Amino acid sequence: MQAWWENIKAQFDLNFIQRSRWRFITTGLGNTLLITLLALLLGTVIGVIIAGVRSTYDKTADGARPSFGRKVLGFFNGLCKVYITVLRGTPVVVQLMIICLVIFSWSDNGVALASLAFGLNSGAYVAEIIRGGIMSIDNGQFEAGRSLGFNYLQTMWYVVLPQVVKNVLPSLMNEFIALLKETSVAGYAAVRDLTYGGNTIAGQTYSYFMPLIVVALIYLALVMFLTSIVSRVERRLRSSDH
């Protein structure tokens, strides 16, 4: 037992204490959280815009008169459908490498490029979550808004969106948890994230167990923390229904 404990201490000292290798973990963790936050913001903005375009087109499809505005909306709806199909139909790691190593190969700002890649990918999923929430709202809510003198945008903002946020918030938060874990592939484009930091330590010490276990535990702690927040939000939303 003592020999096992001494081996653990020796491995910890080798992987984290010597040459201050723990800095790879802290730097990687900071980059991972920053990438996740920026991608979350970008994905939310993209998702809301696309969901608005697609749901507007779908909600006004019946009985709409052919017009220039309708054609423009249909064009953008088609673009949004292509965007969602491509981004959801291809692996995020491939998208990351295309953005970092092909499109913006001249840039060395890995954190910004990774945030862009993950944000674009997340936006496709967020869009479908929000669109599903909008489409689940009964058309009577739109008619009620119109009866109050609201136009379509005002009805969406004051009547529909508050209900949509309540319905889709748990799903959105789960998507953000998935986004955090997806950023672990950022190292494929030489972005110094948390996983990259663990691999760097292992490459220097030729000891993979300790660095990767620590990386896994950090991800687990972050996911458990975010999951607890999601559970609290869901309980509060359920209690508000009564």
Image: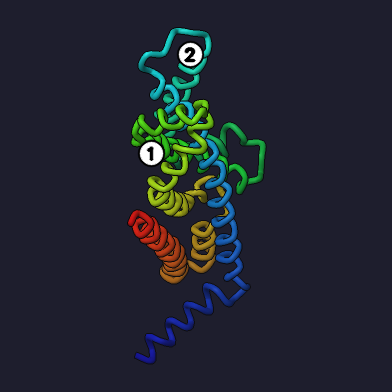
Label 2 sits on a secondary structure element that is helix
Task: Residue 133 in the image: state x and y as whole percent.
Answer: 38, 39
For disc 2, the neighbor class at 10 Å (few under 14, some 14 to 19, many from 20) is some
For disc 1, the neighbor class at 10 Å (few under 14, some 14 to 19, many from 20) is many
x 38%, y 18%: residue: 61
Tell me: 105 left or right of 15: right
Q: Is residue 59 visible?
A: yes
Task: Residue 25 in the image: state x and y as whole percent.
Answer: 55, 65
Tell me: 118 left or right of 233: right
Mark closer to the chain start, 2 or 1: 2
The N terminus - image quarter = bottom left
Task: Residue 29 in the image: state x and y as whole percent.
Answer: 55, 61
x 39%, y 51%: residue: 170
Three-letter code for the amino acid on which mark 2 is drawn: Arg
Label 1 sits on a secondary structure element that is helix
Tell me how far mark 2 sits from mark 1, CA to CA.
23 Å
Residue closer to the observer: 72 or 180: 72
User: Which residue is the site of mark 2?
Assistant: 70
Residue closer to the observer: 214 or 173: 173
Task: Residue 36 in the image: state x and y as whole percent.
Answer: 53, 51
User: Which residue is the site of mark 1?
Assistant: 133
